[in-house]
Amino acid sequence: MDKILRIDVGAAGGPSFRIEPIGAYAGLGGRALTSTIVAKEVPPLCHPLGEDNKLVIAPGLLSGSAAAMSGRISIGCKSPLTGGIKEANSGGQAAQVLGRLGYAAIVLEGKPQNDTLYKVFINKDGVKIAPDNSLKGLGNYDLIDKVKAEYGDKVACISIGPAGEMKMSAASVAITDMEMRPTRHAGRGGVGAVMGSKNIKLIVLDDAGCPMRSAADPEAFKEANKNFVQGLKKHPVTGQGLPAYGTNVLTNVINEAGGYPTNNFSTGRFAGAGKISGETQAQTEQERGGDPTHGCHKGCVIRCSGIYVDKNGKFVTKQPEYETVWAHGGNCGIDDLDAIALLDRMDDDFGLDTIEMGATIGVAMEAGLAKFGDAQAAIELVKEVGKGTHLGRILGNGAAVTGKVFGVERVPVVKGQAMPAYDPRAVQGIGVTYATSTMGADHTAGYAVTANVLGVGGNVNALKPEGQVELSRNLQIATTAIDSTGMCLFIAFAILDQPETFGALVDMIGAFVGKKMTADDVVNLGKSVLKTEREFNLAAGLSKADDRLPAFMKKEALAPHNVVFGVSDEELDQLYNW
């Protein structure tokens, strides 16, 4: 991956492109590359939907190679939701295909001169950009059906739905999976709105005739990759729990721990959790002819994705993830898996972040727009978003906007971004991550649930403030490095518990790039990227005052443990002091 494709959407006569050497960005991939380009090329105070913002799409450093688990893609920009830097991460096929095509990044820049929509086609022979207003308003599923008719079913796609076209701050970017369904999403922070602001509806990637990327030291790479895979397969989480039940295996676990945010973060346990748990979900899928064990991209050995079908065995959506099941389920008091699957399908089709939308519906229920537990009302509210009605545009801009419009005090956001499926009062380490992450509330930024709840990588009492800042800091550094390789975050379970598996990962990266690497190199990469992101946010006007949880988290005790968030502001301000 030695080149960058730049598309100037504001060029006279329509978008133009140029392909240039990677140059000063050599050696970077994934989040490291998106954040570095954004920090260097985007004015921090620019309007997120304006001419000066850029959308950067980058496969990981190892994407397109034989490295297991290396199919994650990073999409970066200045976020219209948080006002700071954003990297949204997704699985699917695009990272592997883009890597084999030789592109380290695609950069969308400039401001369109009119409202014409464009599609981009990239293969080994070059790049074609064409206007296509027939795509306007299409959901991602109908859009991909059109792609199949024109380009066949062996390509990978990056696209937006109507929410992205309407520049909603909850809009996602869709990535097709191995079956060429638009089920994987770079969901967080409104990256879909930025793609929509560039009038690019669709990017089609075809790597036919492109070889797999090869390592600098093939034999050492092969050996390290084998050892890495063995480590993943022998760990109980990555080798057993996730393949059997998907990410939703966490529902019963977090509910039992009392950290499952229910009815808009009003309590920590949901009475209907058993009806929507990973165990129930997997059983339902199997009984109907679906599949609870499935990979979202080639090279995945954990296979935590799945296929959810209706009572007649017809495909509905990919197996709803834990975050989605919580967001549209317990957070809204809904215990109906079929309703949750339909909401997931709608979010994917409209191009919406399921976490942001579920949190938003919870706030809307708190405001009295619907009753907690009313699944049909939740479905109707999401339909409003897809149609772009006045109410839909409010909801489509996220929980913070919805809370302001309807005068709700309990709005679970940090830096304008909705919290995921762990209540910070009962899982205090994740609260530190939500508060201090450069990305806004984001569990993947530093998944302290590992040591707080699961006993992975050690044990830190989830209900006490002691040790949480150090835990979150270390995980944020490690996660940033992982996001830069193209590796799936779920490898963290094995590498935290198994030093030999972490060693195999470091050896694999080193063998691929042709450089002897150590654990310190990985840590230093993570620190460097976080520093870059932090400096951008400070220049964009964010400060330590934004590294805070909502006030209600320190005032309202969460049942069943009756605890508030106890990490002090002074402690939070120490996170970046390494």
Image (cartoon, grey):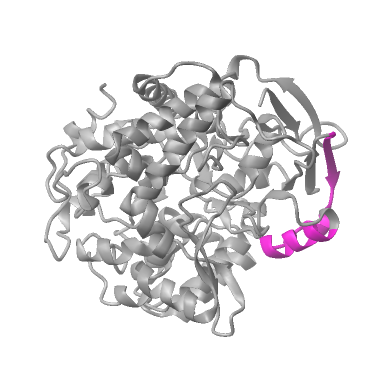
Asked if 576 appears above or below 443 in the picture, the reply is above
Q: Does the magenta segment cover residue 138?
A: yes
* Quarter of the image with the N terminus in it: top right
Q: Position of residue 227 (x, y in %)?
A: 42, 37
* Quarter of the image with the C terminus in it: top left
Q: Nearer the viewer, residue 238 or 383?
A: 238
Q: Position of residue 574 (x, y in %)?
A: 22, 27
Q: Quadrant of residue 20?
A: top right
Q: Is residue 179 left or right of residue 564?
A: right
Question: Which stretch appears magenta?
Answer: 125-149
The residue lying at 43 percent from left, 59 percent from top is: 243
Q: Nearer the viewer, residue 164 or 50?
A: 164
Q: Quadrant of residue 415?
A: top left
Q: Position of residue 506 (x, y in %)?
A: 42, 27
Q: Quadrant of residue 262?
A: bottom left
* Residue 155 in sight: yes
The residue lying at 26 percent from left, 41 percent from top is: 432
Q: Position of residue 110 (x, y in %)?
A: 71, 32
Q: Does the magenta segment cover residue 405?
A: no
Q: Is residue 529 left or right of residue 461?
A: right
Asked if 534 appears above or below 322 in the picture, the reply is above
Q: Is residue 522 left or right of residue 122?
A: left
* Residue 442 in sight: no
The residue lying at 81 percent from left, 56 percent from top is: 152
Asked if 426 appears above or below 73 in the picture, the reply is below
The residue lying at 27 percent from left, 47 percent from top is: 450
